[in-house]
Image (cartoon, grey):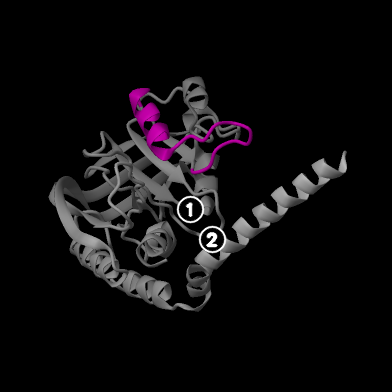
Amino acid sequence: MTDDTADATRTDAAAAVDRVRERAADLAPALGATWTDDEPWRFLTDLTAIGSRMAGSEGERRAADLVADAFERAGLADVRTEPFELPAWERGSASLDVTVSGRDGEPATRSFEALALPYSPSGSVAGELVDVGYGTPREIDERDVAGRIAVASTTTPEGGRFVHRMEKFGYAIDAGAVGFVFVNHLDGQLPPTGSLTFGEEAEAVAIGVSKETGAWLREYAVGGGNGIAAADVAQAELSVEASTTPGESRNVIGKAGPDTDERVLLLAHYDAHDIAEGALDNGCGIATVATA
C-alpha cells in the first residue's frame, strides 16, 4: 500500500467515525429516554390493569382509548380510531371427562381441567382420543383421526418448519376429527389458549389442557405408544359453552414524521386473550409503539 493510499484510507475511516458520532448525537435524547422515561411502564401498567382485552370486548375498547391517549401524548398527528366489524367470541365453561376401564373391569371416569380455545363453538363431542404428536400434517395423515378427538402439542419438532395451532386444528378437522385438544409443552399445570380461526366460528369444539393433563391423555389415547388394546381405549367427552356474535373492534392510527410519498408502517395489536393480563402478548409490543 502506498502512502497516498494509506492516507486516503485513514481519511475515509475518520469520515465514517464522524458520521457515526453525529448519528449517535442525534439519537442520544431518544436513547437516554429509553433508560430514564417511566411512561412505557406506566402505559403497560394501565393497559394490563384493564383486565380482559378480548377482541370486540369492552376491555378492548378501553385499551383503544388508552392507546389513542398515548399517541397524543407522544405528539403524533391526526390521531383517530377507525372501527371495523368482527365476530366477537366470549368464553363460557369447558370440561373434559375421560372414561377408562378400571382394574376390576368397571368403567371409571376422570375429569380434567380445560379451557375452551377462542372461536370454538358451543357443543359436546365424544369419542376415542388419538395422539397426533406435534400435530403436523404428516403425523395426522399417519393416524386414523376420523370420528376421534385429536390430541396435539403446542410446540413444533426440532428442525421442522413452524406449524401454527390453526393449521394443526384445521388439518385434523379436515381429516375427520370431531374435536381437538391442544396440549401445552410447558410445565406448570397451565392450559394454553389461542384462536382457532380468523373471521368466523371454528368448525369443531376445541380445548387447551396442561402438559401434565396431556401426559394422561396420551396414556389413554390411540397411537400414544402405551400398548393399550383397542377394546380398552378410553372414551372422552369434550364440552364447551361459548358464544360468537357480531362485534366491533378499532384500529388506532396516528402519524409521525414528514409528509412524504413513501411511508413506514409501525404496527402492534393491543388486544389480548381473556385469561391473563396480556403483558407480553402484546402489551410490551404496543407499549413500544405507543411510548418508546
Q: Is residue 48 visible?
A: yes
Residue neighbourhood size for the residue with mark 2, other residues' Cα within 10 Å, grouped as few (<14), some (14–19), many (≥20) = few
Spot occupied by residue 107 in the image (x, y as percentages of width and height): 42, 44
Name above or below for residue 51 compared with residue 193. below
Nearer to me, 139 or 94: 139
Report, in whole angstroms, how far the alpha carbon at label 2 lies from the one at label 1: 7 Å
- Total marks in image: 2
Spot occupied by residue 140 in the image (x, y as percentages of width and height): 47, 26
Nearer to me, 147 or 137: 137
Kind of residue indicated by mark 2: Gly
Q: Are marks 2 and 1 in contact (CB under 8 Å)?
A: yes
> Which image quarter holds the C terminus?
bottom left
Spot occupied by residue 180 in the image (x, y as percentages of width and height): 38, 38
172 falls in the magenta region: yes
Q: Residue at x 50, y 78 (%)?
A: 36
In the image: residue 8, left or right of residue 210: right
The kind of secondary structure element at disc 2 is loop
Kind of residue indicated by mark 1: Ser
Return the residue found at the far front. 4
Spot occupied by residue 170 in the image (x, y as percentages of width and height): 35, 30
Return the residue found at the far left. 246
> Which image quarter holds the N terminus?
top right
In the image: residue 73, left or right of residue 108: left
- Residue linked to disc 1: 210
Q: Earlier in the sequence, mark 2 or mark 1?
A: 2
| Extent of the magenta region | 154-176
- Residue linked to disc 2: 188
